[in-house]
Image (cartoon, rainbow, N blue to C red):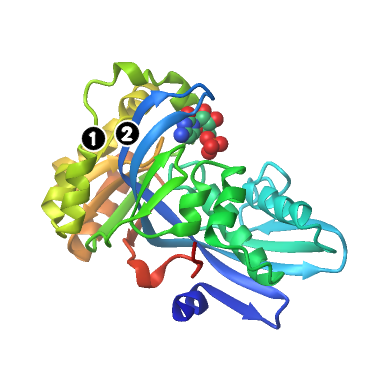
Amino acid sequence: MYTVYKKQMEVDQLETVKVKSRAKINLTLDALYRRADGYHELEMVMQSLKLYDSIAVKKTAQAGIVLQTNLSFLPTDERNLAHRAAKLMLETFSLAGGVQICLTKRIPVAAGLAGGSGNAAAVLAAMNQLYDLRLSLKELMELGLQLGSDVPYCLLGTTALAKGRGEVLETLPDCPHFYVVLAKPDFGISTGAVFRALQAEKIGCHPDTAGMLRAIAASDRAGICARLENVLEPVTFQMQPQVAKIKDFFLSQGAKGALMSGSGPTVFALYEEEEAAQQAAQQVKNAFRIETVVVTETVDKGEQGYGLSF
Ligand code: C5P
């Protein structure tokens, strides 16, 4: 546990904590029904990726939150989930002074890769360490859920089954290794707008979640690829037909499997060989003239999470 913790968090002079905030993909995403509170009851198999944003959180004597990022178009005030996470921690625990957060983004923004939720989770975990709050994973997840449905999963990482709004989590055996190509068209998608357009009661074909769990437990790559399914695809495809075209392109070029992640618009494709992944990345870039194409990999338990226990 300690080794994992040190790998993810570098403590520098006890006043700065550096953390990795990893991207995630959905191997399945099912919506069972719309709940009375407006959220959807979900069932999702989640997988963390090597691709990460770097976050350094530093204590400051002066009150307030200063957030700096490498992307000029990103808001650095309360519209940014990392900022909101810091505010929640400062207020909930009446912490003295303030924090300075340095966020280096590599994960595409508004992409369906939980970049923002991951940043919020990373700030919660970093501040837990920085202020020696000793909060358990469960306590941090409860705080995280106030910020977004994917934040509890981002605190856990690993291959996991998420239910409820996304906060009822069960760690699964590691997914077998894949190279992952992420292709994000040059537009963002609002998760809220996709869920609002979803008619959960009319979904004809639900993912085979139980089959996906069996395939993961058996390290059955073909079985995993055959069961990639996301009920939000038809909604996003209707809004942005290019997303469907990218998925079809990956499959026609020999990807083992391809799927839209989250509410999109990123499409991911899975490969066993790095060379095939690199080649597909170049092909999709050329065919669709999109800038944001990343080759990454799945990670296993040894490389992810914040070393927190329930
Ligand atoms: O929780 P979060 O703010 O990330 O969710 C964004 C939007 O996605 C929500 O406003 C809601 O419309 C939708 N959503 C949903 N059911 C979920 C999670 C999110 O309908 N389980």
Place residue 295 in its image quadrant. bottom left
Q: Say which residue appears at 32% left-offset and 33% top-offset.
A: 30
Query: What residue sits right under mark 2 in the picture?
Result: 30
| Mark 1 C-beta closer than 8 Å to ligand 1 | no
Question: Is the N terminus in the top left, top right, bottom left or bottom right quadrant?
Answer: bottom left
Q: Residue 123: which numbered mark, if any? A: none
| Residue 190 visible at all | no
Q: Earlier in the sequence, mark 1 or mark 2?
A: 2
Amino acid type assigned to the residue bearing label 1 in the image: Pro
SS at mark 1 in the image? loop
In the image: residue 101, left or right of residue 23: right
Amino acid type assigned to the residue bearing label 2 in the image: Asp
Relative vertical location of residue 64 with respect to residue 134 in this rendering, above or below? above
Residue 37 place in picture, x, y as percent = 54, 25
Residue nearest the observer in this picture, 128 or 113: 128
Q: Do the residues labelled 1 and 2 touch (CB within 8 Å)?
A: yes
Residue 134 place in picture, x, y as percent = 63, 68
What distance separates the C-alpha of mark 1 from that of mark 2?
6 Å
Relative vertical location of residue 121 with respect to residue 184 in this rendering, above or below? below
Residue positioned most to the bottom = 13
Q: Say which residue appears at 44% left-offset and 28% top-offset.
A: 40
